Image (cartoon, rainbow, N blue to C red):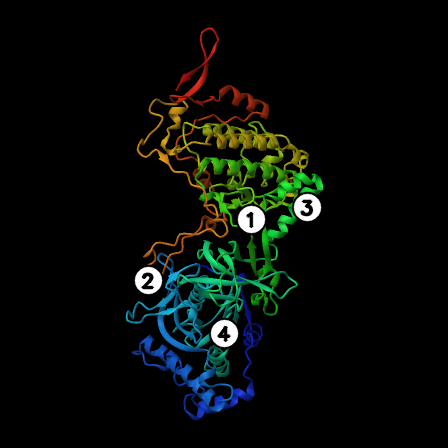
C-alpha cells in the first residue's frame, strides 16, 4: 500500500482540535495546571525532567526489557492521566462522563474478510455506546480486531472502536503512517457511519495525531510526549471523554432488522433548502465499497433500500413500500452529479429537437428521488495553507426511485439484445447533442420493470465521464470499464489510419475519445454475451468490419494544416476529429442487428453458448464439427424478477435458511462484490488489454484493409461470407452452373 503526499496535510495541535474535535471543550491552562500538579504529587510525572514514569521512552529501559513490557506502560499512563483529571476536576471528568476506555494490545491486526490485507495497531479506545450487532451480515458487515499472539482474546468489533494507537520503539514514522492509513481505510469500509477516523502514531515518545478522511489525512506536527506533556494529556482526555469527535455521522445508524440481519439507515435530505429528511433502511447491497482503491477515493457503495419511520429502529422499516436504490459516495467538486447531468442532456436535446424526441430521451434516465450532499461533511474543513479545492471530497447521497437490474444480471437474449438496440437509440441522441458517454458497460445499462406498461424499460446511468465532445481533452482518454473499452482508448491512439496517410493527417497526430468508441463498447458487450450457431449472432462479425469502417471514415479525412505548413509538432495545438465526419448510419445498422437478434429469440426455449461453437468451421476455415462439447448445450433464460404486485403474498424463506454464525468465517463474512465495483480507471498494460479483446473462440480471419472508406466497403461486400441458419445447420448462398440461386450446407 502506498500513500500520496498530496493527500496528507499538516496542522498544529491547536488547529487540530478546533477543526476536527467537534464539540470538544479544549482543556486550557486553568484546567491543565491542577492535573499537572496532581500527577507530580502522585509521582506519575517525574520532576524536574517532567517525564511520565509509566512511559519514559525505550532508552530509559534496560536492553533486556521486551517491547511488550515497554508498551504496556502506555496503558498505565492513560490510567494515570484519567485518574488525575477525575480527582482535581470532578465536575467535568468523572467515571460516568467517560465515552470510551483505552485497551493496550500490541501487534493487534484488523480482519475484514478472507483474502484482505490486515493492518497493525497497538492500542485503541472502545466506545461505551456500542454499535448494533446482528446474528447475520446484511448490508452492513462485521469486521474485527484480533491478536494472533493471544488466541484466547476474543477481539473487538471495528464498529466499536474509537481512536487507534500505533507505536514503535525506533524511527519507523513511515511504517506507522502507512499502517494507520490502512487501519482507517478498513474502519471506514466496515462502518459507513464513519466519515473520519482519529489516530495517534508514536515512535518511541515522538507522537503525531491524525484525522483520516476520504479526502485527505490531517496530521499534527510531531511532539515529544515527555517534553510537551500537556499535548499528550489533552489527547488522552479527548479520547476518553469527548462525545462527538469520532467522525461518526449522526444521520446514519447501524440497526438490526426483523430477520436479525445488520443493516444501515441513512437520513437523506429532501432538498438543499429543507432540514427535513427521509430515513431509508437498506435491504440489500448491490455494490460494496472497494477496499483495493485505498482510503482516498469515492468509497462508493450502492444499496437497495426502503423508507423507515425512525432512525435507529430497524423494525420501523415500511416493508410494503416501493424499493429504492441508494448510492453513497464521496465526490470531488469537479465530479458531475447524476441529476445535473440528466438535466443538462435533456436541455441540450430540447434545444435541437421537438418535444416528442426529448420525452423519448427522458425515458432513458432513471428517476431520482433525491440527489443531495450529506448533512455531516466535516472533511471539508482543512488546515491553513492548504489547497482545499484540490483535495476536498463531499459525501453525496443519491436515491433512485426506480429499482433497476443491470445487464450483468440478464441471460435472456431477447431482452439482452433489445436493450442493446435501445442503447443505440440513446447513443444517437448523445451524438446529436454532441456528448460522449465514455463508459458504456453492462453495469451502466439498466432494465426497469414498468408496472404501468408491464414491460421492461431500458435506462442508462453513470454520466460521471460524460462530456461535450469539444471539451474532451487528450489526457482523459483511458477511462472506462474493461473489457468493454474501445481498443483505441486502451491503445491511446487512432489505429485505423490509411496505409499511405500523409504525415500531417490529423488522426495520426491527435487522439481523443470520440463517438465511435461508445458504439464500439456496445459491440464488445454483445460479443461478450454471444450465444451460438443457429442464430443471427454471426451478423456481429459484420458489425466488427462496420466498426472499423466507421473509424477509418472519420480518421482518413482531416489534415492538420499547421503540421502541413511545417510547424514543429511541439508547437501544434491539440485538435479533435471533426464531428461532421462521423457516420451516423452506424447507429441505425447496429440497432437493426441487435433488434433482429432479439426478435429471432422470441419463443426459443434453449440457447447454445458461443463457446460451444467452432466458428472456424462455420466460416469454412477448417473441417470439423460445428458444435463442440455436446453435453449440456442448452442454458436457461433468466430475466430479472418482476416486482410483486402491491399486497401480493410473498412466500417466507424456508426454515433453516439462515443459521446463527458460530465459526470465525461466519464472523468475517465476505461481501459479494457487484460487477459495478470492478469499475475503475484503466491503468494496466495496454497490449494485454487489447489482447484480452480477442474472443475465446476463433473468429473468421479477415485481412486488415487500409484503403479509403469506399474501398473498405467494397472489400467487405466482396469478401465477407453471408452465413445463414438452415434446418440442418449453417448454409451460405451459392449459384449453380446455370446461375440459379441456392444454398450450400457448410
Q: Residues within 10 Å of mark 2 (few under 14, many from 20)?
A: some
Q: Nearer the viewer, residue 642 or 273?
A: 642
Say which of marks 4 and 1 sits in front.
1
- Identify the residue at horizontal 48%, vertical 9% (top origin): 740
Vertical relation: 35 (above or below) 446: below
Q: Residues within 10 Å of mark 1 (few under 14, many from 20)?
A: many
Q: CA distance from mark 3 to mark 1?
A: 18 Å
Q: Is residue 558 visible?
A: no
Q: Is residue 244 left or right of residue 168?
A: right
Q: Is residue 360 left or right of residue 167?
A: right
Q: CA distance from mark 4 to mark 2?
A: 44 Å
Q: Picture coordinates of residue 445 (x, y %)?
A: 52, 43
Identify the mark at residue 222; answer none if there is no mark: 4
Q: Read off the residue under disc 2.
A: 661
Q: Is residue 149 visible?
A: yes
Q: Read off the residue under disc 3.
A: 347
Considering the numbered disc 3 on the image, is that residue within a helix, a strand or a loop?
Answer: helix
Among numbered discs 3 and 4, the one appearing first in the sequence: 4
Considering the numbered disc 2 on the image, is that residue within a helix, a strand or a loop?
Answer: loop
Amino acid at each position: 500500500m502506498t500513500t500520496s503526499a498530496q493527500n496528507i496535510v499538516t496542522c498544529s495541535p491547536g488547529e487540530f482540535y478546533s477543526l476536527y474535535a467537534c464539540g470538544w471543550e479544549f482543556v486550557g491552562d486553568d484546567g491543565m495546571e491542577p492535573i499537572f500538579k496532581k500527577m507530580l504529587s502522585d509521582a506519575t510525572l517525574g520532576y524536574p525532567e517532567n517525564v511520565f514514569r509509566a512511559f519514559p521512552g525505550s532508552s530509559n529501559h534496560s536492553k533486556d526489557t521486551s517491547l511488550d513490557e515497554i508498551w504496556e506502560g502506555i496503558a498505565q499512563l492513560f490510567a494515570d492521566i484519567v485518574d488525575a483529571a477525575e480527582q482535581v476536576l470532578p465536575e467535568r471528568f468523572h467515571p460516568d462522563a467517560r465515552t470510551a476506555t483505552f485497551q493496550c494490545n500490541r501487534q493487534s491486526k484488523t480482519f475484514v474478510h478472507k483474502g484482505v490485507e490486515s493492518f497493525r495497531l497497538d492500542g485503541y479506545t472502545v466506545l461505551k455506546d456500542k454499535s448494533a450487532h446482528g446474528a447475520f451480515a446484511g448490508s452492513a458487515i462485521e469486521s474485527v480486531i484480533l491478536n494472533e499472539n493471544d488466541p484466547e482474546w476474543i477481539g473487538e468489533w471495528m464498529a466499536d472502536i474509537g481512536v487507534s494507537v500505533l507505536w514503535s520503539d525506533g524511527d519507523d514514522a513511515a511504517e506507522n503512517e502507512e499502517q494507520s492509513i490502512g487501519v482507517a481505510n478498513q474502519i471506514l469500509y466496515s462502518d459507513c457511519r464513519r466519515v473520519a477516523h482519529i489516530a495517534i502514531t508514536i515512535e518511541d515518545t515522538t507522537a503525531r495525531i491524525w484525522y483520516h478522511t476520504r479526502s485527505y489525512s490531517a496530521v499534527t506536527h510531531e511532539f515529544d510526549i515527555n517534553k510537551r506533556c500537556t499535548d499528550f494529556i489533552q489527547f488522552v482526555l479527548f479520547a476518553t471523554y469527548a462525545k462527538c469527535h469520532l467522525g461518526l455521522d449522526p444521520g446514519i445508524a447501524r440497526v438490526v432488522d426483523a430477520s436479525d440481519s445488520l443493516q444501515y439507515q441513512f437520513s437523506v435530505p429532501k432538498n438543499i433548502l429543507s432540514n427535513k429528511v427521509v430515513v431509508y433502511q437498506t435491504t440489500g447491497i448491490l455494490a460494496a465499497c472497494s477496499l483495493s482503491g485505498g482510503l482516498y477515493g469515492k468509497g462508493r457503495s450502492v444499496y437497495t433500500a426502503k423508507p423507515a419511520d425512525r432512525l435507529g429502529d430497524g423494525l420501523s422499516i415500511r416493508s410494503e413500500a416501493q424499493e429504492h436504490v441508494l448510492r453513497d459516495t464521496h465526490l470531488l467538486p469537479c465530479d458531475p452529479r447524476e441529476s445535473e447531468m440528466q438535466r443538462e442532456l435533456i436541455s441540450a436535446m430540447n434545444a435541437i429537437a421537438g418535444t416528442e424526441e426529448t420525452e423519448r430521451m427522458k425515458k432513458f434516465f432513471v428517476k431520482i428521488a433525491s440527489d443531495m450532499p450529506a448533512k455531516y461533511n466535516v472533511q471539508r474543513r482543512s488546515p491553513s495553507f492548504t489547497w482545499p479545492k484540490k483535495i476536498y471530497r463531499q459525501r453525496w447521497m443519491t436515491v433512485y426511485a426506480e429499482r433497476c437490474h443491470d445487464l450483468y444480471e440478464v441471460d435472456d437474449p431477447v431482452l439482452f439484445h433489445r436493450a442493446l438496440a435501445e442503447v443505440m437509440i440513446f447513443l444517437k441522441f448523445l451524438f446529436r447533442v454532441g456528448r460522449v458517454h465514455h463508459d458504456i458497460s453492462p453495469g451502466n445499462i439498466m432494465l426497469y420493470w414498468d408496472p404501468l406498461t408491464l414491460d421492461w424499460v431500458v435506462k442508462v446511468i453513470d454520466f460521471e465521464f460524460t462530456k461535450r465532445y469539444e471539451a474532451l481533452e487528450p489526457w482523459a482518454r483511458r477511462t472506462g470499464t474493461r473489457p468493454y473499452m474501445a481498443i483505441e482508448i486502451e491503445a491511446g491512439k487512432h489505429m485505423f489510419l490509411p496505409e499511405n496517410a500523409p504525415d500531417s493527417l490529423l488522426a495520426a497526430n491527435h487522439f481523443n475519445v470520440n463517438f465511435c468508441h461508445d458504439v464500439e463498447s456496445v459491440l464488445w458487450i454483445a460479443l461478450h454475451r454471444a450465444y451460438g450457431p443457429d442464430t443471427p449472432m454471426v451478423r456481429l462479425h459484420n458489425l466488427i468490419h462496420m466498426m472499423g469502417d466507421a473509424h477509418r471514415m472519420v480518421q482518413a479525412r482531416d489534415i492538420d494544416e499547421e503540421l502541413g505548413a511545417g510547424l514543429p509538432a511541439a508547437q501544434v495545438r491539440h485538435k479533435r476529429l471533426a464531428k461532421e465526419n462521423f457516420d451516423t448510419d452506424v447507429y441505425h445498422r447496429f440497432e437493426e442487428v441487435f433488434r433482429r437478434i432479439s426478435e429471432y429469440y422470441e419463443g426459443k426455449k434453449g440457447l447454445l453458448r458461443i463457446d460451444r461453437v467452432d466458428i472456424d468451421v462455420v466460416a469454412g476455415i477448417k473441417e470439423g464439427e460445428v458444435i463442440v462439447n455436446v453435453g449440456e448445450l442448452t442454458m436457461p433464460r433468466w430475466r430479472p424478477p418482476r416486482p410483486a404486485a402491491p399486497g401480493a403474498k410473498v412466500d417466507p424463506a424456508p426454515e433453516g435458511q439462515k443459521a446463527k454464525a458460530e465459526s470465525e468465517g461466519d464472523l468475517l463474512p465476505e461481501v459479494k462484490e457487484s460487477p459495478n465495483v470492478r469499475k475503475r480507471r484503466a491503468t494496466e498494460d495496454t497490449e494485454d488489454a487489447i489482447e484480452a479483446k480477442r474472443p475465446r473462440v476463433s473468429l473468421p480471419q479477415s485481412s486488415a484493409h487500409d484503403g479509403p472508406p469506399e474501398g473498405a466497403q467494397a472489400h467487405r461486400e466482396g469478401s465477407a461470407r453471408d452465413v445463414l441458419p438452415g434446418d440442418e445447420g449453417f448454409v451460405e448462398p451459392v449459384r449453380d452452373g446455370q446461375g440459379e440461386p441456392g444454398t450450400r450446407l457448410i
